[in-house]
Image (tube, rainbow, N blue to C red):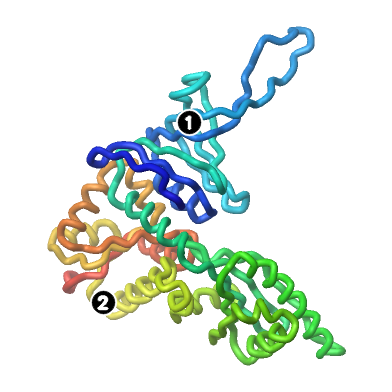
Amino acid sequence: MKLLKKDLRGNDGEISLMVESLDDMWHLKYILEPQDIVFAVTKRRIEGATDKLRPEKADKKTMRLGICVEKVEFHKFANRLRVHGTIVDGIDTGAYHTINIEEGTDISIIKTWKSDQLERIKEAQIASMRPKVIIATIEEGEASIGMVRQFGVEESSSLRQSLGKGEGNTRNEFFGELASQLKWAAEKVDAVILAGPGFTKEDFLEFIRTREPELAKKAVLEDTTSIGISGFQEVLRRGAVDRIMEESRIGREAKLIEELMKEISINGKVSYGMADVRNAQNLGAIHTLLITDELLRTEREGKSIDEFLKEVEHSQGRIVVFSTEFEPGKKLEALGGIAALLRFRVNP
């Protein structure tokens, strides 16, 4: 995400951004709220005078419109964010319109900004400069490839091949297909983590050192007990992505949720669920507040959550917003979407 303009008086004003990736669209999903004003170049059909006997569809014209946001939809698999609302600046004022935000879109947002939203923009800017990483989890005859994004590891493809007669040739075919898929994906990233149980990943690394030396130069090995989604999760927990990216949002989330579950298991310095967490804050006990992006979004409709977040910040508490797109956020969601690691134990 690239910051183009920032014109704020206090927390009110305009920020202009260039959307550079799918991660940026995910961030915008949780930045944009109803009643925000969004400006962008878009296409709109202009109705003109036509022959009533032979009506024709008017052509869509490219123009810059401002809309008052009503709803935002993140279409991950279409690489698109759709912003729905009514036009407040431009032609057809008051009419309904949808702005499609994609990679390369410049948008301007006018609103009352909250501290976590400004922090999200700052984080997205920093993240855009970090190395990009993919993970391939491999065992004999089976592999999964995932792109590490700020909202989680997005599985892009998987391979499965049973080994039978002519095992050596079949294995080479499997390695060749995996190398082909990784080579295409690796052109856009800086590192490839090869993970999995046993020695298949080592054998595959030797294979690509001969066949695809440029791909092999980007590869690092990591031991895991499983492959697929759980294998991706193990890679994050072990800190492999952190070591490559220096600091990973989802790697941090995985470690925090592990610490949270450990404290819960021993009835330690932890609270979860809205009522218990608010009680802990009343006692000044919150060290780190964990909240899901979805709960933050829905609670904002009632306006009360922002005052609570300010209270946590004023008492020197740290706030971490979890993505519900990936396993740590899903675990937090199962606990009510909010929990806190505490300075001291408050529950009996």
Residue drawn at x 67%, y 72% as measured from the top left: 182
Within the image, what quadrant is residue 275 found in?
bottom left
Q: Position of residue 54 (x, y in %)?
A: 79, 12
- The quadrant in which the C terminus is found is bottom left
Tell me if residue 337 can be seen.
no
Number of residues whose C-alpha sits closer than 10 Å to that of mark 2, classed few (under 14), some (14–19) or many (20 or more): few
Q: Which residue is mark 2?
A: 267
- Upstream in sequence: badge 1 or badge 2: 1
Secondary structure beneath label 2:
loop
Residue drawn at x 56%, y 74% as measured from the top left: 191
Secondary structure beneath label 1:
strand
Mark toward the viewer: 1 or 2: 1
| Left or right placement of residue 265 versus residue 32 in this view | left
Which residue is outermost to the right? 165
Q: Position of residue 180 (x, y in %)?
A: 74, 72
For residue 85, the mark is: 1
Q: Amino acid at mark 1?
A: Gly
| Left or right placement of residue 92 versus residue 109 in this view | right
Within the image, what quadrant is residue 16 found in?
top left
Tell me if residue 281 can be seen.
yes
Name the foreground residue: 219 vs 200. Answer: 219
Residue drawn at x 40%, y 33% as measured from the top left: 37
Number of residues whose C-alpha sits closer than 10 Å to that of mark 1, classed few (under 14), some (14–19) or many (20 or more): many
Residue drawn at x 47%, y 39% as measured from the top left: 107
Q: Position of residue 147 (x, y in %)?
A: 57, 66
Q: CA distance from mark 1 to mark 2?
A: 47 Å
